[in-house]
Amino acid sequence: MKIANYLFYRLYKNSSVTNKSIPEWSSIIVISITLSFNIICLAIIFDYDIKSIGKKGFQSLPIILIVINYFIFLHKKRYLNFIQSFDQIKNKLIYDTLVLLYILGSILFFFYLVEMEVKYWIYMIALILLTSQIPNFIRFMKK
């Protein structure tokens, strides 16, 4: 659970820079969409008949995960406790890199498995994720 908490923490910290109103909701939405990609990838890998899920099933998966993540992270403001504890960690570069690789890998593996020909979007997602970590690398290099 500590890994999931750190994932939320990193997404929360990154989104709170630009999203001052609801960074906690932005964080659970990103986590839920990433988990949706992971679940769909597992279904493809294990040869599950994806067509049987249907359009409504695919649309409801992220919503169900948002509700679950709400209770895991936001209910009774649970996220405030682990944000405070993770703020005290000094060298977060390794953890931040793992978070970046997880999200990037989930998205790219999903695109690979569903054989989407959207190379432009894949490169754009990679560029956005990499540039989001530039402030962390600069802080690390100054130390």
Image (tube, helix red, strand yellow):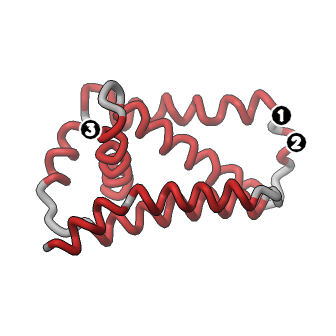
Earlier in the chain: of badge 3 and badge 1, it is 1
The secondary element bearing badge 1 is classed as helix
Local packing at callout 3 (Cα closer than 10 Å; few below 14, some 14-19, many 20+) is: some
The secondary element bearing badge 3 is classed as helix
Local packing at callout 1 (Cα closer than 10 Å; few below 14, some 14-19, many 20+) is: few
Residue 91 horizontal/vertical position (percent):
19, 69
Q: Is residue 62 above or below residue 94?
A: above
The residue tagged 3 is 79
The residue tagged 2 is 51
Q: Amino acid at mark 3?
A: Tyr
Earlier in the chain: of badge 2 and badge 3, it is 2
**Relative side of 35 to 70, left or right:** right
Residue 86, image quadrant: bottom left
Residue 83 horizontal/vertical position (percent):
21, 45
Whether pointer 2 and pointer 1 mark residues with C-beta atoms closer than 8 Å, the reply is: yes
Residue at 83% in and 46% down: 50
**Relative side of 95 to 105, left or right:** left
Q: Amino acid at mark 1?
A: Gly
Local packing at callout 2 (Cα closer than 10 Å; few below 14, some 14-19, many 20+) is: few
Say which mark, if any, is on residue 54.
1
Q: Quadrant of the C terminus?
A: bottom left
Residue 132, image quadrant: bottom left
Residue at 15% in and 61% down: 89
Q: Is residue 30 above or below residue 71?
A: below
3D distance between C-alphas at marks 3 and 1? 34 Å
Evaluate whether residue 7 shows in this view. yes
Query: For this rendering, which residue is in front, 124 or 58?
Result: 124
3D distance between C-alphas at marks 2 and 3? 36 Å
Query: For this rendering, which residue is in front, 58 or 103?
Result: 103
